Image: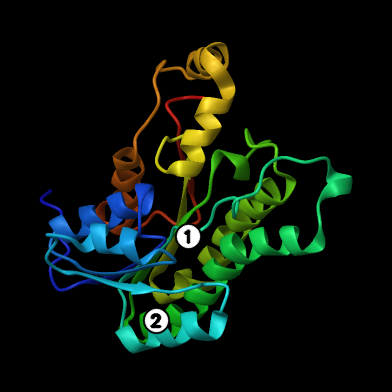
Amino acid sequence: MNIRFDGKTIIVSGAGHGIGRAIAHSFASLGATVHGCDLNAAELAETAKGQAGIHTRVLDLTDRAAATEWVRGIGPVFCLVNNAGGVAGQVMRPIEEVTDADWDRIFAVNVGAAMALSRAAAPAMKQAGEGRIVNISSGAGLQASLTGIQAYCSAKHAVVGLTRQLAHELGRFNITVNSVAPGFIRSNETTERQWESYGTEGQKALVERIAMHKLGTAQDIANAVIFFASPLAGFVNGQIISVDGGR
């Protein structure tokens, strides 16, 4: 099957670097019109550079009203990829040292953003009688997190829960909702710092715990997203694919 997305509009949050950039580029290369958002204007400019069909917007998705306005301004969307998230610059601390503000920030950028964008995109998908929502969760949404950050692990579990519940709610409208759960991917400054923190022995141990004995790439994650958005996954709903090489 020759998979194309000509005439389709795609939204990718967190499109400024790493996995989000790979997803945006993949859809654009297959003919889609892609709208991407991120906090970093310079990184968004690099995402759009030389890429026909990619439109970008600097946006803080914790501002749910602004997120809603952005989606509605784009018009009907075929596929929404909720990729924005991460640890919000935080590191592991004992639970007694975690502040309310830090906890809430991680939930806002991971779960709140996905909820707000899905809520904004769903009405037009229902009217069109089709749609795809793909949530980027994490291996941390299925087990304890390598980061050790309690809020991050909890938020990614919540993204998995949101995926399953929306799949149940929206399936009758021919809208599928699925999730890609990446393993450890060296895709941005945060993951590079995490990788370096393991040291040579820790890095070796991490790779050896992967059945394929290698790390994946941002493109590996993008490929799984393309599958969920394609006709090949037309009857796949409420599923979580772990793209982790067999951790």
Q: Give x and y (percent) for residue 178.
A: 46, 56
Q: Residue at x 51, y 26 (%)?
A: 196
Near mark 2 (Cα within 10 A), the count class, few <14, some 14-19 or many ≥20, is many
Q: Which residue is mark 2?
A: 71
User: In what element is the residue under mark 2?
Assistant: helix
Camera-nearest residue between 101 and 42: 42
Query: Mark 1 = which residue?
Result: 84
Residue beneath the point at 65% across and 57% down: 158
Residue 28 position, x and y percent, is: 18, 60
Q: Is residue 93 left or right of residue 31?
A: right
Image height of 193 relative to 112, above or below: above
Badge 2 amino acid: Val
Identify residue type, mark 1. Answer: Ala
Which residue occupies 55% across, 11% down?
Answer: 201
Quarter of the figure with residue 50 = bottom left
Give the percent coordinates (x, y) of residue 241: 45, 42
Vertical relation: 177 (above or below) 154: below
Marks 1 and 2, how far apart in space?
15 Å
Residue at horizontal 33 percent and vertical 80 percent from the top: 129
